[in-house]
Image (spheres, rainbow, N blue to C red):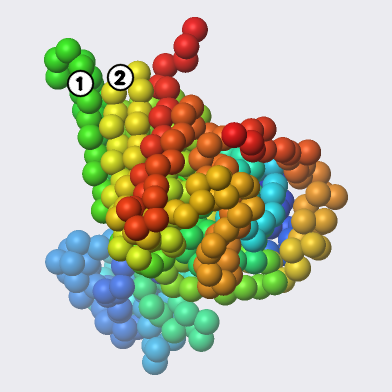
């Protein structure tokens, strides 16, 4: 799915534009647990989240995520915007809840990661 | 290169607003000024056209072409209102440059007055101002790209340029405790360093995730902060996160996925789910945790940079 389609499907507003409308988004994911994003986040994934602190942007950087969608029209604090600008992450905002935003994107054809497991969780 | 440049121009055309491109020091002509006066003014100011305004309203546009025609037809000493072009297209200051480029491309429109929502003149955009702006932006973006390329080029040759029996590059970062807004800075710099050393992107990502989890642990769980040491060799990368904090009571317990001692405010920020060490274990080729109560903690991680086959 292209970024512009994601924005249309979510009736979203771009808060910080660091990628063009034709940026390809291969997969989507949603989490409020940043460790989950670090464990399961795929490169290029659109991350839907209800968190707005700067560490969301840091997490995205580490996981190779370019686009973050803030759900329920959450406002990002200035330090989050500043870090996103510095690291070249695109921030968008949608009025839908996490559940509905995910549902809309999935119905519109943006796939998830399927069944994921931590491969090695015993040592 | 050419493909990339075209994309950049297109991007600029659709993301730049007219107000960022326009010239704001607009020279304005009054309808009563003579063509001869305007001719001198244009020559002195090096312009080839200007809006004609009457009581704050744009009533026409006078250009070099209009002046030549006036001269041919003997109207040099008559008011410009007799010779100016009457139908003037204007453009809103918040429209995108792509719109303007379309109009400027048409015959006879090489300048457009820029107006605000109330119709007041705020600037002028010409083929010249537009071209200069785009070239300047392209140059900036090229310089940025080139400088990153240069950093990468210089760094990536270190293991060829510096000869020893065993060369390693050591990076040292100090991490402050409870400095949540700066947490991740060291990881960010380590990631950039590895990219400049042209380490395989998959490995860079694994290292970034592991180091970031370790850095968050220093921020969250030590009361004194700590240090991250990165030892880069040609074939191997070793990272150690060391602190002189309270130490860990039960090592077995902290290695259980889901076990966490993080306070609520950390959990509210999306961390402290007890997955950090599990993540590090999963993405690294070797992980070792050494700690005792009161004696600080040391977390070692190793990543192979060359695949074993």
**Residue B195 placement, left or right of A80:** left
* Outermost residue toward the right in this view: A107
Residue A105 shows in the view: yes
Give above or below for B269 relative to B228. Answer: below
Give above or below for B230 relative to B223. Answer: above
Point out residue B3 in the picture as x, y percentages from the top left corner: 47, 31
- Image mark 2: chain: B
Point out residue B301 in the picture as x, y percentages from the top left corner: 41, 35
Indicate the quadrant containing the N terminus of chain B: top left, top right, bottom left or bottom right.
Answer: top left
Give above or below for B231 relative to A31. Answer: above
Q: Residue at x 14, y 19 (%)?
A: B162
Rendering quarter of residue B208 = top left
Q: Residue at x 70, y 47 (%)?
A: A28
**Residue A39 placement, left or right of B157:** right
Helix, strand or loop at label 2? It is loop
The residue wearing badge 2 is B234
The residue wearing badge 1 is B167
């Amino acid at each position: 799915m292209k970024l512009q389609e994601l924005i249309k499907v979510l009736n979203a507003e771009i808060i910080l534009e660091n990628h063009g409308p034709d940026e390809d988004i291969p997969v989507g994911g949603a989490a409020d647990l940043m460790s989950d994003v670090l464990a399961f986040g795929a490169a290029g994934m659109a991350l839907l989240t209800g968190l707005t602190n700067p560490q969301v942007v840091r997490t995205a950087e580490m996981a190779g995520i370019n686009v973050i969608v803030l759900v329920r029209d959450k406002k990002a604090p200035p330090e989050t915007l500043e870090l996103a600008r510095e690291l070249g992450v695109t921030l968008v905002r949608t009025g839908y809840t996490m559940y509905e935003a995910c549902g809309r994107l999935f119905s519109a054809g943006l796939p998830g990661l399927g069944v994921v497991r931590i491969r090695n969780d015993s040592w | 290169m050419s493909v990339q440049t075209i994309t950049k121009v297109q991007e600029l055309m659709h993301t730049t607003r007219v107000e960022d491109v326009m010239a704001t020091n607009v020279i304005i002509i009054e309808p009563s000024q003579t063509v001869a006066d305007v001719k001198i003014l244009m020559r002195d100011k090096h312009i080839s056209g200007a809006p004609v305004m009457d009581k704050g309203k744009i009533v026409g546009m006078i250009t070099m072409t209009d002046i030549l025609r006036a001269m041919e037809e003997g109207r040099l000493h008559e008011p410009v209102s007799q010779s100016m072009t009457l139908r003037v297209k204007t453009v809103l200051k918040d429209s995108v440059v792509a719109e303007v480029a379309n109009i400027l491309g048409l015959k006879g429109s090489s300048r457009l007055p820029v107006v605000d929502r109330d119709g007041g003149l705020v600037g002028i955009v010409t083929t010249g101002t537009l071209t200069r702006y785009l070239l300047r932006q392209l140059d900036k973006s090229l310089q940025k790209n080139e400088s990153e390329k240069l950093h990468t080029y210089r760094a990536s040759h270190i293991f060829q340029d510096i000869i020893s029996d065993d060369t390693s590059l050591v990076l040292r970062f100090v991490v402050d405790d409870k400095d949540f807004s700066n947490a991740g800075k060291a990881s960010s710099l380590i990631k950039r360093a590895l990219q400049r050393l042209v380490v395989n992107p998959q490995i860079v990502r694994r290292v970034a995730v592991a180091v970031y989890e370790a850095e968050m642990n220093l921020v969250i769980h030590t009361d004194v902060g700590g240090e991250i040491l990165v030892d880069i060799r040609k074939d191997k990368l070793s990272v150690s996160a060391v602190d002189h904090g309270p130490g860990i009571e039960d090592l077995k317990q902290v290695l259980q996925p889901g076990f966490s001692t993080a306070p609520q405010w950390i959990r509210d920020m999306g961390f402290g789910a007890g997955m950090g060490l599990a993540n590090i274990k999963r993405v690294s080729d070797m992980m070792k945790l050494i700690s005792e109560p009161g004696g600080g903690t040391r977390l070692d991680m190793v990543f192979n940079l060359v695949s074993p086959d």
